[in-house]
């Protein structure tokens, strides 16, 4: 990714722990999170973002809610059975960020925008996509192999296709 943006001298990618990384005295126009800020405890997520922004800077947070039940209810039911049987992560995801709470940390002008889109995967590309989810990455054996095999078999049974009706939400708030 760094090479893609190498011609932009004011664009920086930091690979590090958001809460612990030392940004020095740098201030930014934008802090952007695509479905990651909800993994950070609220006081750290919002306080650190506020601290890093210049006055008038924005915190932009995006979430994706993928509905695969509506376009394929039978497949949805079969996948839920696979989840029920084999999805046993050692650590459950319990973090629930309330995005509007950014206002409690000094932010103003909270806005919410919703966008609709559609996605389609075949079995292999869907399994690759699932492999990017934190709670799926940590699945241990004997569940891991059985889980992914079950997902694959269900999608193959349904013409090797799973469709999503997505709602993408952008939460935007500003540092005064």
Image (tube, grey):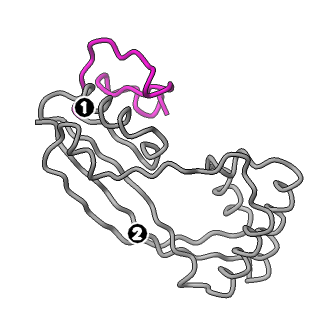
Return the x and y of residue 130 as percentages of the image width and height: 66, 57
In the displayed structure image, the side of residue 92 where residue 21 appears, left or right: left
Labelled pair 1, 2 in contact (Cβ < 8 Å): no
* Up/down of 94 relative to 151, above or below: above
Residue at image mark 1: 50
Return the x and y of residue 108 as percentages of the image width and height: 14, 45
Q: Can you tell which mark lies on residue 99?
A: none
Residue at image mark 2: 167
Q: Secondary structure at mark 1?
A: helix
* Up/down of 58 relative to 44, above or below: below
In this orientation, which residue lies closer to the viewer: 175 or 125? 175
Residue 40 in which image quadrant: top left
Quarter of the figure that contains the C terminus = top left
| Residue at x 49% of width, y 34% of height | 1
| Residue at x 21% of width, y 46% of height | 173
Q: Residues within 10 Å of mark 1 (few under 14, many from 20)?
A: many
Q: Main secondary structure of the magenta part?
A: loop
Mark positioned earlier in the residue sequence (1 or 2): 1
In the displayed structure image, the side of residue 114 where residue 104 appears, left or right: left
Q: CA distance from mark 1 to mark 2?
A: 27 Å
Return the x and y of residue 144 as percentages of the image width and height: 82, 54
| Span colored in magenta | 1-29
Q: Residues within 10 Å of mark 2 (few under 14, many from 20)?
A: some
**Is residue 105 shown in magenta?**
no
**Is residue 3 shown in magenta?**
yes
In the displayed structure image, the side of residue 48 where residue 174 appears, left or right: left
Q: Secondary structure at mark 2?
A: strand
Return the x and y of residue 86 as percentages of the image width and height: 80, 63
In this orientation, which residue lies closer to the viewer: 107 or 113? 107
| Residue at x 34% of width, y 41% of height | 32
């Amino acid at each position: 990714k760094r090479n893609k943006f190498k011609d932009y001298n004011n664009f920086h990618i930091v690979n590090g722990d958001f809460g612990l990384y030392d940004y020095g005295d740098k201030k930014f126009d934008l802090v952007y999170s695509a479905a990651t800020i909800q993994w950070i405890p609220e006081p750290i997520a919002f306080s650190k973002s506020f601290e890093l922004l210049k006055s008038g800077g924005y915190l932009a947070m995006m979430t994706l809610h993928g509905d695969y039940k509506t376009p394929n209810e039978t497949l949805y039911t079969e996948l839920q059975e696979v989840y029920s049987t084999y999805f046993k992560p050692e650590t459950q995801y319990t973090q629930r960020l309330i995005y509007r709470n950014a206002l409690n940390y000094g932010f103003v002008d909270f806005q919410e925008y919703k966008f609709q889109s559609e996605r389609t995967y075949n079995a292999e590309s869907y399994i690759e996509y699932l492999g990017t989810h934190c709670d799926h990455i940590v699945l241990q054996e004997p569940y891991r192999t059985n889980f992914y095999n079950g997902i694959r078999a269900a999608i193959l049974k349904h013409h090797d296709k799973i469709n999503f009706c997505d709602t993408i939400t952008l939460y935007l708030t500003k540092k005064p």
